[in-house]
Amino acid sequence: MEWTDETIARLKALWQEGLSTAEIGRQLGITKNAVVGKAHRLGLPARPSPIRRQDGKTAAKKTAETGEQAKASAPRRTAKETASAESAPAASVSAVAAQPAAVTADAATSGEASASQVKKPAEKPVVVSSTKTESAPAKPLETVAVNEKPAEQRVKATVPALTKVAQEEAVVEKPAPVAKKASPASRPAAQRLAAVMEPRRRSATCCWPLGDPGTPGFHFCGATPLPGKPYCAEHAAMAYVKLRDRRENAG
DNA sequence: CCCTGATTCGC
DNA sequence: GCGAATCAGG
């Protein structure tokens, strides 16, 4: 994997948005291991994990093993076939969304998530978390955009297609005709703040992140998004892909 | 089983 | 530095 500034930036952005490592990996066309490893090396903040390993023990065990059978090098390399499981046939046709969860807020609003299988989406650190953006130094208009970025909305990727349809229907609200980028400063601060904190409003522009957040060059796609989606048609196609099929085309 | 993230360690 | 293998919890 060639970690260009581009990919690193995207990793950072997606990581900071709270996407799962596997999710990030799929979008970048790499494995979750690569994502985690890189994130770890970059010193990115560890995100809530239910797991914590009992240190020392396993390490000692491994050390002992390698110590004893130093000759039998690279045993697990051969087990590489196991990895095929990940890139294996994506028979599942059901789920569709990568992170179309934006809907969570909207669905809740309309009160009909029909979420028999939706796992309490609200318990995730969704919208609020995106407020802690590190790209604050940017221009005000970007600050606004940041709060509408992709991950502000993530839902369990396991959301069934049916539910997704229901959600999309629930989202058919008309986005306020607000020219957010056009004249942010022309609006009263209160209004701008309100706009920022309004989770239900769909972005007026495609929020696909480009570049490194926190740097002047960072920007969002900016194209006209699909109705009810944070991305333009082009990037929505990249973001909303079948669960298992993503690794190929992402990137 | 599926998912998740963290760590280790050969390369 | 990289990431597959592995661990480990949900």
Image (cartoon, coloured by chain):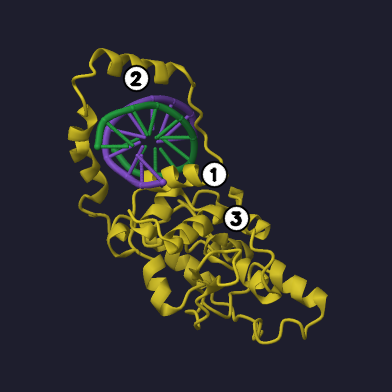
Chain colours: A yellow, B green, C purple
Q: Secondary structure at mark 1?
A: loop
Rounded to the nearest angstrom, the CA distance separating label 2 from label 1 is 25 Å
Q: Nearer the viewer, residue A58 or A96?
A: A58
Q: Can residue A231 be seen from the camera position used here?
A: yes
Q: Can residue A114 be seen from the camera position used here?
A: no
Disc tally is 3
Question: Which residue lies under the disc numbered 1?
Answer: A43
Q: Amino acid at mark 1?
A: Gly
Q: Are marks 2 and 1 on the same chain?
A: yes
Image x and y of residue A49, in percent = 52, 37
**Residue at 26 percent of width and 12 percent of height:** A68
Chain on which label 3 sits: A
Q: Amino acid at mark 3?
A: Val
Neighbour class for label 1 at 10 Å: few (<14), some, many (≥20)? few
Question: Which residue lies under the disc numbered 3?
Answer: A126
Q: Secondary structure at mark 3?
A: loop
